Amino acid sequence: MKQTTRTRAAWTAVSAVVLGIAAPFAATVPASAAAAAPASSLHWTRCAGSGLDPRQECASVEVPMDYADPGGRKIDVVMSRIPSEKPATRRGALLLIPGGPGGSSLDDPSGKGQKLPQAVRDTYDLIGFAPRGLAPSTSVSCGLDHGDLAVSKLRPWPAPDGSIALNMATARRTAAACARNGGALIRHMDTVDEARDVDRIRAALGERRLSAWGVSYGTYVGAVYSQLFPHRTDRIVLDSNDAPDRGSRGWLAAYEAGVEDTFPRFATWASAPGNPDRVARTAAEVRPLFLRLAARLDRAPIPWPGANPEELNGNVLRQTMLDSLYAPSRFPTLARLMRAALHGTVPPAPAAPPEPLQQNVTAVAAATICNDVAWPRSAAEYRRGVTESREEYPLTAGMPRNAMVCAAWPYPPEHTPVRITSHGPSNVLLVQNERDVATPLSGARKLRDALGARAVMVTVDSTGHGSYLANGNACGDRTVSRFLATGERPYEDTRCA
């Protein structure tokens, strides 16, 4: 659907060297020569939207709103599929787990699923879904003020002097709106609930075991699902990995390391001779130039009609930096904004997704993040963190340790965060770029350590968020494709240069 393509845009805004950590082949799940498509009670119909593969079909599965009350109110989770292209070699279903929270994979069987090698498309039915709370599944909205939908406000950038008073006020205002407008469902949205919904999807498909390809936040969902339902997993690919402590604000703090890992590549690109978007003569000049420009915009913002907010200030520039480091293909966006601002001008305002979509995505993200774990309430704790972060990581200016809506969230978590352990089948392959602004290598290594002998990790010498078939390299792509198609993993952790 066009809607889910915009959803992804809204939040952003994929030779081996042995490393020496042994792990066995993924042979725990018996391989069958072919698995006929199982019987299913789902009612499959043509998916709404344009530009989809004509083979893609959609259905919905009914799940409990509150798993503690399975006989109570039900909600719908909408899923999609493109069946295996070679039924004689079909193994099962491959669930495409989206990032976010707030992302959807409903269009992915028609989108990135068609980038999969033929052998993989022959092996699986490709399955996408819109997680609970996200339209066209039973949806939620917080009904936020338009100004509070600005990404530079949703990410808790402190004031230029480091003050967090406005951030705390924004947290209270947005949390109150979610409580007032979100309905009962907003209290029952977290990663554990999504993992349980995934198992309902598996059961509705009639599959004994489920393979999955999770990206970004989807790696956390995949890891939690593999921990809660290990005997129901087949081949699991976790791509661009969250640390296992994601639920304890780790996902936000990860931007400190992610920006430091990635910004030097931007600096090299932005200073290359012949680059029409060049901002400096040498890579060493780019970082201080960016910091000076952000400070100047803190003092004297430039009007930016049509944008949200309607000015280019220092935090808008910083947020643009964060968004632009997600992939080298986005580097020109930051460079062009810097070049314009240096001359006191702005480019045309970026197109925004429809506001109802922004409201829906924002509500799903806020509810999932805040329901996963209780955040501190003390402004003093955030002030200390912001002060330390600003000193150590000036590019991110304290944002990764600041207060967002969860600092005032009115509901306590319903579940204890799931501890990821080494107990379970050895059927997980992690793929991770070395330079990833959102899920840095340091966090992926923590997940790798937590999984122990259950997993093997392939580290890819590449830049960008999303490695497999996206911002990685051919070696990493071959390794993942081989695992999905045949179950063969490297014996040990490897690096793809």
Image: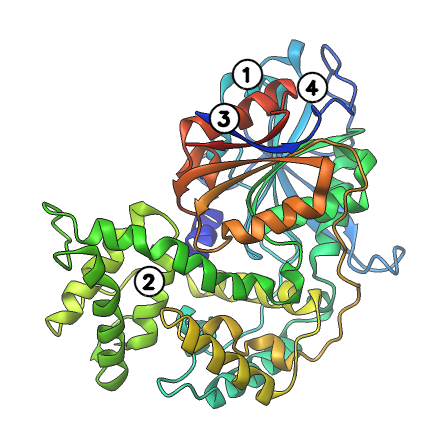
Q: Is residue 51 visible?
A: no
Q: Which residue is mark 2?
A: 321
Q: Quadrant of residue 222?
A: top right
Can you tell which mark lies on residue 116? Answer: 3
How would you rate the neighbour count of disc 3 (Cα within 10 Å): few for under 14, some for 14-19, many for 20 or more? some
Can you tell which mark lies on residue 91? Answer: 4
Q: Which residue is mark 1?
A: 119
- Residue drawn at the location 76% of the way across and 55% of the way down: 419
Up-down: is 227 above or below 249? above
Which comes before the other along the chain, label 2 or label 1?
1
SS class of the residue under badge 3? loop
Give amino acid for label 3.
Leu
Q: Quadrant of residue 281?
A: bottom left
Can you tell which mark lies on residue 46? Answer: none
Of the 4 image quadrants, the one containing the C terminus is top left
Which comes before the other along the chain, label 4 or label 2?
4
> Residue 75: percent from the left, percent from the top?
74, 54
> Residue 289: percent from the left, percent from the top?
20, 68
- Residue drawn at the location 51% of the way across and 17% of the way down: 118
Q: CA distance from mark 3 to mark 2?
A: 30 Å
Which comes before the other along the chain, label 3 or label 2?
3
Give amino acid for label 1.
Ala
Relative placement, left or right, of 129 versus 473 is right
Labels 3 and 1 touching (C-beta < 8 A): no
SS class of the residue under badge 2? helix
SS class of the residue under badge 1? helix
Between label 4 and label 2, give the one nearer the viewer.
2
